[in-house]
Amino acid sequence: MIETAFVGAGNMASAIVRGMLNKGFCTAAKVACTSARDGTGETLAKNTGIAWFESLETMLKADSGIRTVVLAIKPQQFAQLPDSVAELTRGKLIISILAGMPVARLAARFPNAENIVRAMPNTPGQIGAGITAYASKLPLSAGRLADVEGILGSMGPVLTVEEGQLDAVTALSGSGPAYVFAFVEALRDGGIAEGLSPDVAFRLAMHTVLGSAMLLEKSGEDPAELRRKVTSPNGTTQAALEKMAALDLHGTIMAGVKAARVRSEELAKG
Ligand SMILES: NC(=O)c1ccc[n+]([C@@H]2O[C@H](COP(=O)([O-])OP(=O)(O)OC[C@H]3O[C@@H](n4cnc5c(N)ncnc54)[C@H](OP(=O)(O)O)[C@@H]3O)[C@@H](O)[C@H]2O)c1
């Protein structure tokens, strides 16, 4: 019996399905997907053993056991969903990962749903190393909480926030991977400017970020404390950090997060 149905079978849906199966949240027999025209649904089904349906309507009519519908299409594809979804999702839990799609707009499209969850994952979720924050329209029962956390938890840790905070979440963890990639680019280019080959500079930069993030997680210490530990008085790190502080690295990143939050709010207004 199918329990979880995916609308959309692209990068994120594939990552969630693979994570759910790998982590043993459920078996392939309990999952189905549908996509539009590019064959992503067939490919996901072939690779994972989940069921594939030609259309959303066929999928939702196929099995009355479907309890949860995961919406994993692009936000601009939302308007193409057929009107019949309103009736076909009666009594089901909707989990949407559409960036910037407010619960109120989801509720207007799925008026008969049991509950609606709006989630914000991030790109490392594609390899199970993401973090997802979510908000639900109504409080979740214990059983539904387990469903939501099992599905979203397949991409990495999960936490709850108020819906009003999801723009800030988008600005921090949603867009955040791009800030980290920009930092790696700058670190690499700094190394190249100081005489390293591009390959050596890239490997040093990437592993510095990777290792520092792992140390941060494993040590449980505050980043400021770890930063102080690698900064000997009058040493090389101090010279670099003083230069970066003079150019307001901290304020620059905070200003970037603010700009993303403002943009996220603008986009949600449509
Ligand atoms: N990528 C990220 O890290 C990330 C982070 C946070 C949030 N998100 C959100 O995740 C969502 C999905 O992103 P993605 O990168 O997985 O997109 P994607 O790879 O483009 O996948 C979109 C999927 O939706 C299918 N689709 C399109 N229109 C449809 C329709 N009317 N009915 C059924 N299926 C339809 C597509 O099918 P065809 O390919 O067959 O056309 C495809 O399988 C987006 O809303 C995005 O905002 C993504």
Image (tube, grey):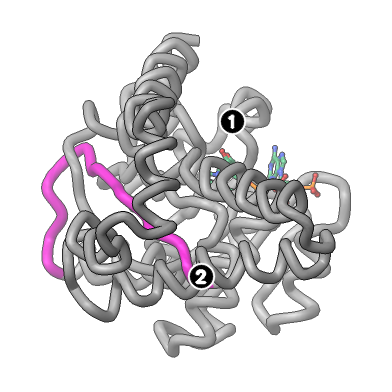
The range drawn in magenta is: 128-142
The kind of residue on which mark 2 rests is Leu
Q: Which residue is mark 1?
A: 75
Left or right, 139 with respect to 268, comes to: left
Can you tell me whether the CB of the residue at mark 1 lies under 8 Å from the nearest atom of ligand 1? yes
Position above or below: 126 against 73: below
Tell me residue 90's x, y (percent): 37, 44
- Is residue 15 in sight in this rendering? yes
Q: Earlier in the sequence, mark 2 or mark 1?
A: 1
Q: Which residue is mark 2?
A: 210
Left or right, 222 with respect to 27, comes to: left
The kind of residue on which mark 1 rests is Pro
Left or right, 261 with respect to 72, comes to: left
Tell me residue 50's x, y (percent): 65, 77
Q: Quadrant of residue 46?
A: bottom right
**Which residue is at the front of the view, 165 or 27?**
165
Secondary structure mostly seen in magenta is loop
Distance between the Cα atoms at labels 2 and 1? 31 Å
